[in-house]
Amino acid sequence: MKIEILGIGCPKCKKLTELAQEAVKELGIAAEIIKITDINKIISYGVMMTPALVINGEVKVAGKIPEKEEIKKWIKEVKK
C-alpha cells in the first residue's frame, strides 16, 4: 500500500503524516508513507489545498486533517 501526504511541510501536513503513521501501525499493515512537497506533483493530483492524503493513487481528503479513525477506515477499504 502506498500512502502519500501532499503538502509543503506546514504543521498541518506534519500532523497528517503522524496520523497516517499511527493508523498504519495500529492496523498492523505494511504501507509506504511518502511526503510529496513538489507543488507540480501536488497539482497533478488536482489538489488545490493542502494537506491532502492519497492512498494508492486516490485522493481521500484535501484541505483538512481527518480523524485517525477515518484514515483507518480508508485504509481498510483499500485493503479489501
Image (cartoon, rainbow, N blue to C red):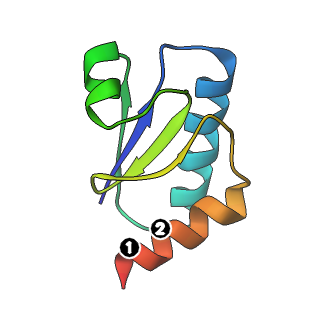
Q: In the image, 18: left or right of 60?
A: right
Residue 75, label in figure: 2
Where is 41 relative to 66, above or below? Answer: above
The picture places residue 37, in percent across and down from the top left corner, at 38, 17
Q: Residue at x 59, y 26 (%)?
A: 13
Determine the secondary structure under disc 1: helix
The picture places residue 72, in percent across and down from the top left corner, at 59, 66
Determine the secondary structure under disc 2: helix
Q: Quadrant of residue 45?
A: top left
Labels 2 and 1 touching (C-beta < 8 A): yes
Q: How many marks?
A: 2
Q: Amino acid at mark 2?
A: Ile
Q: Amino acid at mark 1?
A: Val
Q: Residue at x 59, y 59 (%)?
A: 71
Q: Residue at x 36, y 85 (%)?
A: 80
Read off the residue under disc 1. 78
The picture places residue 25, in percent across and down from the top left corner, at 54, 58
Label 1: how many residues lie within 10 Å, few (<14), some (14-19) or many (20+)?
few
The picture places residue 39, in percent across and down from the top left corner, at 34, 15
Q: In the image, 52: left or right of 45?
A: right
